[in-house]
Amino acid sequence: MKLVYSKALPLLVFLLMMTCYVERGRGAACTSTFFSALVQLIPCRAAVAPFSPIPPSETCCNAVKTLGQPCLCVLVNGPPITGVDRNMALQLPDKCTANFEPCTPSI
């Protein structure tokens, strides 16, 4: 039980910090926090894993379209996410025929 808490606490602290980070720096068009946007894209996990040959599922594509381009850009321009290849994530709109404008890198 103690091992679970010792692993969960740092993750929770990290997620809370990232939520505050995105809240301060996000554009007005994205109404999701970093954490909620990340949770919404859980169905895309297999499609954005490094070196993954798996195409995005219909559920993933629906999540991408629902989330929208501004929030997807917040995720790909935000802090690194373990197990997520940013280049693969940037390809999701094209693979899902979402017709989003490309994300511009944050400086």
Image: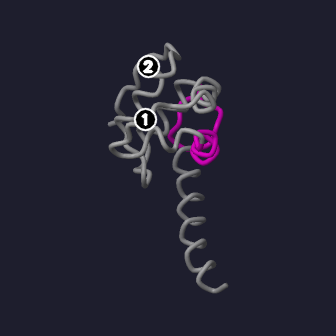
Of all residues shown, which one is farthest toward the top?
A: 99
Disc on res. 6: none
The N terminus appears in which quarter of the rendering? bottom right
The amino acid type, in three-letter code, at marker 1 is: Ala
Residue, disc 1:
89
SS for callout 1: helix
Q: Residue 56, position in %: x, y?
A: 50, 31
Q: Residue 31, position in %: x, y?
A: 65, 32
The image quadrant that residue 71 belongs to is top right
Vertical position of residue 90 compared to residue 102: above or below: below
x 62%, y 78%: residue:
4
Q: Earlier in the sequence, mark 1 or mark 2?
A: 1
Q: Residue 37, position in %: x, y?
A: 60, 40
The image quadrant that residue 63 belongs to is top right
x 56%, y 31%: residue:
57
> Foreground: 89 or 53?
53
| Residue stretch rendered in magenta on the structure | 24-42
x 38%, y 37%: residue:
53
Of all residues shown, which one is farthest toward the front?
A: 53
The answer to whether residue 85 is left or right of residue 63 is left
x 43%, y 55%: residue:
82
The image quadrant that residue 54 belongs to is top left
Q: Residue 27, position in %: x, y?
A: 53, 30
Q: Residues within 10 Å of mark 2 (few under 14, many from 20)?
A: few
Residue, disc 2:
94
The answer to whether residue 86 is left or right of residue 71 is left
Vertical position of residue 69 compared to residue 39: above or below: above
